[in-house]
Amino acid sequence: MERGNQTGAGHFLLLGFTGPPDLQPFFFGLFLSMYLVTFTGNLLIILAVSSDSHLHTPMYFFLTNLSFSDICFTSTTIPKMLRNIQTQSNVITYAGCLSQVFFFIVFGCLDNLLLTVMAYDRFVAICHPLHYMFIMNPQLCRLLALGSWCISILVSLLMTLTLLRLSFCTHTEISHFFCDLPEVLKLACSDTLLNNIVVYLMTFVLGVFPLSGILFSYSQIFSSILKISSARGKYKAFSTCGSHLSAVSLFYGAGLGVYLSSAGTSTSRTSLVASVMYTIVTPMLNPFIYSLRNRDMKGALGRLLGRLVPLCVGGPLRNSHE
């Protein structure tokens, strides 16, 4: 193959869902539906929290950030995949690939950090209820959210900028439906030792420490819940963190599935399916988890839809009568 220069001239081929032509409409419809569900569900959560004063609390403040992050996370990869399926073209430019890598890492890290912050919020709410409003004050909440954004952007910049020092072969093929950083590094024609060190270091720091914080928070939460004497009190305490615990389990379960599948088998198709679970299915299910398991959120969504439906249905009718 010809060598590309360090400025990244050339392009890559995304081979994630290449296959028989008669299956392409099925893939297009499936992933378009999943993207619309993800976008609509997370947008409804943001609108419901914003429009209901009862939900202006730290937990729902972080939830709106998580929903916005999930919208951006899926928008980084799915629209390009849908376009490739529709046009029967698997090409992505070098600049487009770098952009995908950057934003994918930003919003992936942001999801990770926000789930950690939300675990700390539940820890304070259950283990220190009398001091909850003092500890989780608006200033601290904004600082935690801003810190999560800044760390995610800095980490992504570090990982992405190190790609600029590499040269790539032209017309290289990526076995995923998006530019996954480990897959891109495999295609480099120059030494990737520094890149791999950065990737492993950042993965360790942003994987082990947040997960350890979540596990510690929930160990303290469960310990406090077990000390509650009444069964109703235990149920209420569990219900306040049930949605978040489900989202954490889904996020880390899918993420670990990706790495375990890629480490345990050489089949690219298995790794591709695991990546779909991690990058598409998890963000799509989060709105259902928080709406179905949370009474306050169900009430807010019901009131929001109650206001939106008459506007959508009645607006044109009023105009026609006028």
Image (cartoon, rainbow, N blue to C red):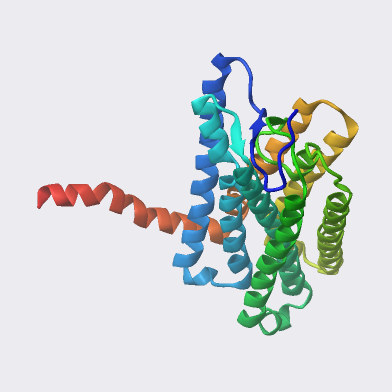
In the displayed structure, 317 sits above or below 201; it is: above
Q: Between residue 315 and residue 31, name the one nearer to us.
A: 31
Judge whether residue 40 can be spotted in this image. yes
Q: Quadrant of residue 170?
A: top right
Q: Position of residue 221 (x, y in %)?
A: 81, 66
- Is 9 on the left or on the right of 200, as rendered? left
In the displayed structure, 84 sits above or below 289; it is: above
Q: Position of residue 147 (x, y in %)?
A: 69, 72
- Residue at the (49%, 54%) spot, across then down: 43
- Please state the total of marks drawn on the protein image: 0
Q: Between residue 161 and residue 104, name the one nearer to us.
A: 161
Q: Between residue 227 and residue 88, name the one nearer to us.
A: 88
Judge whether residue 115 can be spotted in this image. no
Q: Position of residue 176 (x, y in %)?
A: 70, 33
- Is 291 on the left or on the right of 271, as rendered? left
- Residue at the (63%, 23%) spot, across then down: 18
The N terminus is located in which quarter? top right
Q: Between residue 178 and residue 315, name the one nearer to us.
A: 178
Q: Position of residue 266 (x, y in %)?
A: 86, 27
- Residue at the (90%, 32%) spot, across then down: 264
In the displayed structure, 236 sits above or below 7; it is: below
- Is 16 on the left or on the right of 56, as rendered? right
- Is 7 on the left or on the right of 48, as rendered? right
